[in-house]
Image: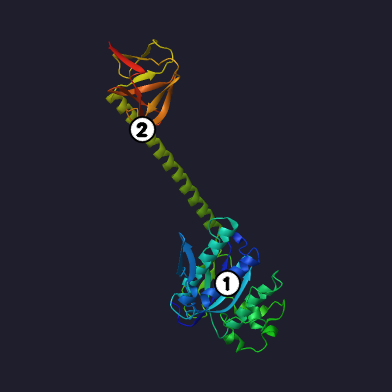
Amino acid sequence: MPAKGSYYHIYNKGVEGRVIFNDQEDYLTFVGYLREYLSPAPKKEDTKKVFTVNGRTYKGTPHQPKNYFGKVELIAYSLVSDHFHLILNQMAKDSQSNLLRSLCTRYSMYFNKKYKRTGSLFDGPYKSAEVDESTELLPLSRHIHDQNLQSKISTHEFSSYPEYVGKRKSSWVKTQFILSKISDYEGYIGKHVAHQGDTETLKHVILEQPALERITPSSHKEKSFKAVTPTPLTQTRNRTLEFLFATTSIFILLFAVGMKNVLAAKASLSLAEEKPRASIVINSTPSIDTTITPSVAGSTSTMTVKIKEGYRNINVRQEPSTDSQVIDKANEGNTFDLVSEKSGWLEIQLTGGTTGYISTQFADIEETKR
């Protein structure tokens, strides 16, 4: 684990190179979260708010975000439209990772809600590299501030550069260590000037690289990351594995669907063999018989449904009672499977597998076996 008082360069960018800061509000929100995390936590009494529920007034403390004051120090920061840089001093175990996890999650929720989007905002977990305070800290601060100066942001307010040149004071940005090493920071930076020497000095801690892989350092100079470039052979193997995985998944899915259909068909045949069913045909003309053939050979059932004059349909009820809820209508010409006959009611099969009841005052059943 990193030792207490270790300096780190933190970097993260938008997924697929997307912009993560669209307007001034986005920048200010991200900076506001940093300030809130790294400033002293407010007293509980100061956070209480008055709210009203059902006409009654209460005073309570709303949920407060986590606080990392005294655990992590922000040495410098720079926000550009599609990525951000932080230089942190970790002073308590795991405080840096907890801070970054909370910060990125909270900002992603804000961003997705504002722009009505879903999914990941950042290109995976943040990247981190330990920084040598004696040789790398100063040029690294120049590197991230220079990126901001050369961006399209003309006011440079979304970096810690104003704190370092005396144009702004923020207690949560700790400039003391770097400014104790150099008196003219603005001259040290140089406006819009490329610093060729920094590239060699910072080659182990500059994280704007396409792919990074953690390695175990044997010394401080052998840093925690190295660049990885996939070979054509590796890319081909990866594509082959992806194709095999997709093909296998489709085969398993189709096989499962087929088995489900087979089982369903067997179940239907079993039910048909267990109990013969007759069909009901609803007619609006009295005294017309409809002959139905049950599913079991060797018997025939005849049912006549007589509807009183003036009625065009019959109520189908949930239970065999006139007080029961009407769940359907049996219109003239409709055909139903007969499930059973109860006292004064006929139970019929409805669409979707449910059953309902028709009063026998509209239907008489006559069965003739042969």
Dot 2: what SS?
helix
* Front residue (pair 239, 105): 105
Q: Are marks 1 and 2 in contact (CB under 8 Å)?
A: no
Q: Relative to 147, is 316 above or below?
A: above
- Would you say residue 189 is visible in this rendering? yes
Sort mark 2 into few (<14), some (14-19) or many (20+) by Cα contacts within 10 Å.
few
Residue 214 in view of the camera: no
Badge number at residue 130: none
Q: Residue furthest front?
A: 55
Q: Nearer the viewer, residue 241 or 182?
A: 182
Q: Quadrant of residue 31?
A: bottom right
User: Residue beneath label 2, please?
Assistant: 264
The mark nearer the N terminus, 1 or 2, is 1
Query: Image check: 226 left or right of 261?
Result: right
Classify the position of the C terminus by image quarter. top left
Locate residue 369 relative to residue 44 in the image: left or right.
left
* Secondary-structure class at tag 1: helix
- x and y, in percent, of residue 123 in the image: 55, 62
| Residue at x 33%, y 18% (from the top left corner) | 294
Question: Which quarter of the image is occupied by the N terminus?
Answer: bottom left
Disc ID at residue 32: 1
Residue situated in front as seen by the camera: 128 or 152: 152
* Residue 306 place in picture, x, y as percent: 38, 15
Identified by mark 2, the residue type is Ala
Q: Position of residue 312 (x, y in %)?
A: 45, 19
Cα separation, mark 1 vs mark 2, equals 59 Å
Residue 65 versus residue 260 in the image, above or below: below
Residue 361 vertical position relative to residue 234 in the rendered view, above or below: above
What's the residue type where badge 1 is placed?
Gly
